[in-house]
Image (tube, rainbow, N blue to C red):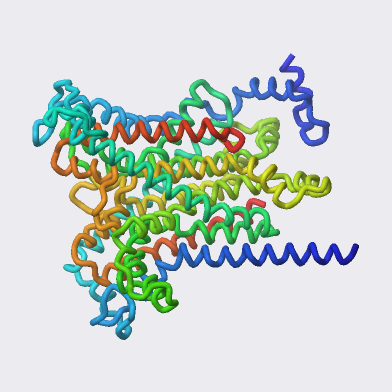
Amino acid sequence: MARVVESQHRGLIGAQPSPPPELVEKKRRTRHEEGFPVGWLIAPGVAWLLLFLVIPLVSIIVFSFWTSTGHGMTADPTLHHYGEYFTTEGFFDPEADRFLGPSIFIKTLWSTFRFTLTVMFFCLLLGYPIAYFLAMQVQTFKWQMALFLLCMVPFWTSYLIRAVAWLPMLGRRGLLNSFLVSSGILEKPSSVLLYSEFGYTMALVQLYVVLCVGPIFFSLAKIDKDILEAARDMGASAFQIFREIIVPLSLPGVAIGMIFIFVMIMGEFATAVVVYGGKTSTVGTVILNYYAIANYPFAAVNALMLMIAMMIGVVIILRLVDIRSQL
Amino acid sequence: MARRWTAERKRKAAIKSIFSGYYVIFLLFIYGPMFAMFILSFQGRRGGTSFPMRGASLFWWNKLLEPSSVGDLKGALLRSVVLALIVMVITALFSTLFAMAFRKRFAGSGLLFYTIMTGIMVPGILLSLGMATLMKQVGISPAWWSTGLGVHVVWTLPFGFLVMMAVFNRFDSALEEAARDMGASEWTVFKEVTLPLITPGIVAAGLFGFTLSYDEFARTTLLAGENNTLPLDINASMTQRIRPTLFALGTASTLFSLLMIGLFLLVYTILYRRTR
């Protein structure tokens, strides 16, 4: 049956009304013999991903159960490093022999997570209006793209350098301080801007905000303007339209943007060193420190915990919002 | 009636100007620090790393050219560019192949899709750690052109892949079917019909590959081996006392990035016009 339908429509595409959806579906399924064989197309990429993505990640899991020897590790399976992770300066501490609360590593993971949420919040707050402006207020496609690209350019430059660029802004004699003093908000320059949570947040928001502008812009641009027009004709106020049409339809874009920012900042360590002067520890800096002293299994445990925390976060976001319409 | 109409228009114009104003402030926010750095790189000989400027000079730029001040700068730059070029080619190739495969349904396509996307999701530090410890265990020393290249492509591939997926989403397969009906072989169809139409997309995928690799730091941290790439060099120079030389280096590197982006956009526009 499918064969017949297919032959009927060959060469007539565009000239005939489109066939019923179930027939299109059948036709799609019969098309597999056309084009290059899938196996050949994916083989090189799959091999690459296995070698440089899957195997390293699996080896982190494996190594987290190995034994550290002080200058390397041996393949004796142990849970020692997990024990260390959960008890150091924390609950069930065998040395203190009493309940002390979460271990120092869980605290670091938690503070990294909390901090990431703060940055995500500000990125959304600052980025959404930009995406809205680009998608809804800018009329021509050409200008939309131009203004969008202008926002995206920093993403294609080094974030390390953009982090460095915050130093002359935030320092005691930095631009922000001189602005605050000259405008009378502060009496004397403040030294808490740089190497503080404030400066770190600001720098991270600036570094990553473009990552949420993109997806939100795309989902907003997809909204059929006729729907908005219809709502307006039926007497909906601008706020009602925003709350009941625009926000729900842009949620997939918001979710994708938030996932991007979430995973990038959870694993962040370079900006912490540059803008925070290494005064804080994120999970990333902890991992690097233990790598530096050659305690690889413990670095792996930290990495694994970070991975698990990130997966939980991503799953929560995906549960809240169905992003499939964007793929 | 007419009055209500003009009031409505005025309100809309007011909203639009508020948003435009916010857009400008937003641009200042994301570009401002970089501009401050650009200006400070021309700091006078006696000036420091913050304003005010004490005269203007090329002193710090000249220091950049001296071999001792920031390590092996020329070598680092060369390595970064070569690495970025290789990553660019591989990213463009793999993302095109993957996207072509995903035009059809095949067993495991869902799994493969998520595996590709994992490349964006996994923090660079995790891949670096996994790869570096594995190499230590196996006894191979990492290098920027082997392990570094490997994880860079893992990072850039999803971006190129998404670009190519978007390209094929809008692709009119009727053109290929027409060519097939006229007896063209698969290879001819690809070469004569598909490839010319998707070339702008391939260029865009390559842009992601090049710039993301050129600037990548986290993924190279533990994997570059003996020889630094440029971001590693910049990071190393930050552990010393910060001087305006660093700003000159940052400015130079950023200008190079911008130049490459401009070049890619130019090529993209030319190719895009030609395919229409």
Relative depth, front residue between B101 and B42? B42
**Residue A253 sits above or below residue A164 on the image:** above
Farthest top residue in view: A1
Asked if residue A202 can be seen in this view, the reply is yes
Q: In this view, does A106 lie to the left or right of A19?
A: left
Q: Spot the residue most to the right.
A: B1
Q: In which quarter of the image is the C terminus of chain A?
A: top right
The answer to whether residue B271 of the structure is visible from this angle is: no
Could you tell me residue B253's position as x and y percent?
A: 35, 64
Residue at the location (47% across, 32% down)?
Answer: A316
Give the quadrant of residue A266.
top left
Position of the N terminus of chain A, as image quadrant, is: top right
Q: In this view, does A147 lie above or below A62?
A: below
Measured as percent of width and height from the top left, residue A130 is found at 57, 57
Kindly indicate the quadrant of the structure image that contains residue B61. bottom left
Question: Outermost residue toward the bottom?
Answer: B55
Check the image and report above or below for B211 versus B176: below
What's the residue at 23%, 35% (across, down)?
A103
Q: Nearer the viewer, residue A157 or A2?
A: A157
Taking the view exactly as shown, the residue that stands out farthest to the front is A98
Q: How many marks?
A: 0
Query: Which residue is found at the position 85% from the left and 63% from the top?
Result: B4
Would residue B207 appear left or right of A195 to someone viewing this image? Answer: right
Question: Residue A92's spot in the image, x, y percent?
Answer: 20, 27
Residue B172 picture location, percent across and down: 67, 39
